[in-house]
Image: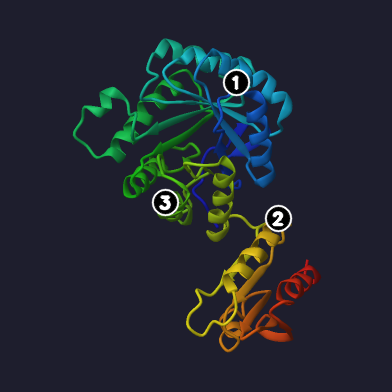
Amino acid sequence: MKRTETKQVKIGRLTIGGQNKVLIQSMCKHKTSHIDEVVKEINECEALGADLMRLSVLDEEDAQAFKEIKKQVKIPLIADIHFNPDFAITAIKNGVNKIRLNPGNINDETKIKEIVELAKKKNVAIRVGANSGSVNPDVDKFDIPLSHKLVFSVKKHVEILEKYDFHNIVISLKASNVKETIDAYRIASELFPYPLHIGLTEAGPLDISLIRSTAALSPLLLEGIGDTIRISITGRAQDEVIAAKRLLHDCGLYDNYPTLVSCPTCGRTQVNVQELGKKVFKYLEDNSINLHVACMGCVVNGPGEAKGADIGIAGGKGQYVIFKKGVVIKKVSEAEAYDALIEEINKLR
């Protein structure tokens, strides 16, 4: 898919922007100074597919913790800075690869200049990250839509960075409202040459966030907007990574991932498609098997509806048929179904 062309920005060993892949990131749920818990969480997220991890900086102890965390993880780290610009300076000195500055609460140009000079020296990127709960106080006075407030908040901050010849910039403009988020990013994609970090802030717990985030981010991704993504979930960071992979895959932007289709079931269904589908998809994910697999509940329609699948299974009254590209290759009992399907899947790996 052709994406919006943006400036390429280095984040450690990675590059955001241009036509590089959309990078997946999440944010640690533990206090950054709790090093053992944070390292465990980062490494688990990396194993699931995270390219970057962001960590909050509440105090000096958090800012200093990056030095030890960096020794125990491989992926680039982002320091999330609010209110106190001195924490950004400490985090950069301790090896962070990127910092996030909030234009709503960091406005001291003298301090921003100090951060910029150090970031240049250390090859650290800066994300100017506005969100609906914290826009620039001067901009917030205007009677304009929130999406415009987010854009103008970012614009004011970017102009300060550019004033000091800093261009290693990433931008985000997150609202908790779907339409406002989409509007803000569409404007930003026309206005700024820099890579966009897309996401929806305060998206809610898992089930709510998956719907809300998909509604907001899918239109952007399909329009070619977005260079890195976080799906915010009130819950585990690991679930954020999994959700981002699935969304990118379904938008045609993440190739090395399984596709599972299954029917919604109906009164014709006489086997437990739901349980079989869950087990099969877990096996595919756990083993990184990039196949299109179907689990269907009707022998009559299943192979036909899912004929595009590399391999599939369809059930009817205690038995299943296994098919490849819509052609039935064998019949098995319900008790044999999972093992028989996995055997056939492994033949195609």
Callout 2 environment at 10 Å: few (<14), some (14 to 19), or many (20+)? few
How has the structure been colored for display? rainbow
Q: Which residue is mark 2?
A: 286
Mark carried by residue 208: 3
Helix, strand or loop under label 3? helix
Q: Residue at x 44, y 36 (%)?
A: 172
Pick the quarter of the image with the N terminus: bottom right
Mark 3 or mark 2: which comes first in sequence? 3
Q: Position of residue 83 (x, y in %)?
A: 41, 18
Q: Which residue is mark 1?
A: 33
Q: Position of residue 69 (x, y in %)?
A: 67, 24
Q: Position of residue 277 (x, y in %)?
A: 61, 68
Is 238 positioned to the left or the right of 225 in the image? right
Which quadrant of the figure has residue 317?
A: bottom right
Q: Residue at x 28, y 38 (%)?
A: 146
Q: CA gap, disc 3 to disc 1?
A: 30 Å
Q: Position of residue 170 (x, y in %)?
A: 50, 33
Callout 1 environment at 10 Å: few (<14), some (14 to 19), or many (20+)? many
Q: Amino acid at mark 2?
A: Asp
Mark 3 or mark 1: which comes first in sequence? 1
Q: Residue at x 60, y 20 (%)?
A: 33
Q: Residue at x 47, y 41 (%)?
A: 234
Is 171 positioned to the left or the right of 24 in the image? left
